[in-house]
Amino acid sequence: MMKRLLTIATMVLLFPLQVGALDNPALNTNLARDWAIQARGGYGWLSDNGLDLEGFSLGVSGGYRLYEDLFAKLDVEYSDFSWAGEERARYLPLSAGLEYGIDLTPIVPYVGLSAGPLFRAVDSNDWKTKWFWQLAGGLDGIITPDFAVGIEARYHGDLENFSQNSLYVTLAVKTIYRF
């Protein structure tokens, strides 16, 4: 059900690209803006210590253009997973990293790599901290020089123990404002 909602939301958000934004030469300046903020919401999957969980994910980030299509980013995300309807796990990763986009106006594919602390509570309010790395990728659709929408996938891995990487994946739709 959640996959269908994400698919429909993505189609609705990207619809303006099909209705005339493709012919607008002014859109070429979108990645030339120095600052960017974004908000996203989506669905996540977690497989950790034999537990398979699903839940929602919300995040915000900010970034600054370092060089042409290379951005430095700070990111915070909140994910709430549950299983068996009773137990739950909450993840709060904070990260800093780099993102590289290829301007194929009006579509911008990108990939990013970041790392930081991950605050985690499983079935309690006892939050524990571990270090993680994150690989992100997606497509942004430029609507105006200042505004874009997109879809994104993120994979989170454990920096402290590579041999026991828990699988933590999120898929989201997002909005981006550049200034």
Image (cartoon, rainbow, N blue to C red):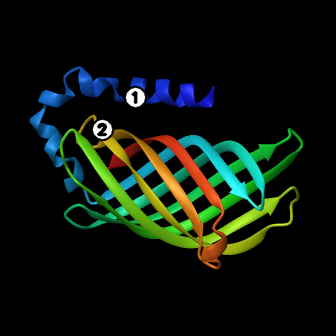
Residue placed most toward the observer, 52 or 141: 52
Can you give x and y, in whole percent of width and height, for residue 138 in the image?
Answer: 38, 47
Please state which amino acid type lies under the numbered disc 1: Leu
Give the residue at mark 2.
141
Badge 2: how crowded within 10 Å, few (<14), some, or many (20+)?
many
Can you give x and y, in whole percent of width and height, for residue 126 in the image?
Answer: 86, 66
Please state which amino acid type lies under the numbered disc 2: Gly
User: First in sequence: mark 1 or mark 2?
Assistant: 1
Disc 1 is placed on an element classified as helix
Residue placed most toward the observer, 145 or 76: 76
Do we see residue 21 in this rendering? Answer: yes
Can you give x and y, in whole percent of width and height, for residue 81 in the image?
Answer: 74, 47
Residue 73 lies in what quarter of the image?
Answer: bottom left
In this rendering, is residue 146 above or below 46?
above
Is there a contact, CB below 8 Å, between mark 1 and mark 2? yes
Instruction: Determine whether, in the image, residue 173 is placed left or right of residue 170.
Output: left
Residue at figure coordinates x 23%, y 20% from the top left: 19
On residue 80, the disc is none
On residue 13, the disc is 1
In this rendering, is residue 1 above or below 40?
above
Residue at figure coordinates x 17%, y 40% from the top left: 27
Can you give x and y, in whole percent of width and height, for residue 76 in the image?
Answer: 57, 59
Quadrant for the N terminus in the image: top right
Q: List the single residue furthest toward the top.
A: 19
In this rendering, is residue 160 above or below 52?
below
Instruction: Determine whether, in the image, residue 44 is placed left or right of residue 35.
Output: right
Residue 25 lies in what quarter of the image?
Answer: top left
Disc 2 is placed on an element classified as strand
Residue at figure coordinates x 36%, y 55% from the top left: 36
Residue 91 lies in what quarter of the image?
Answer: bottom right
CA separation in Å, label 1 and label 2: 9 Å
Instruction: Determine whether, in the image, residue 65 is placed left or right of residue 135.
Output: left
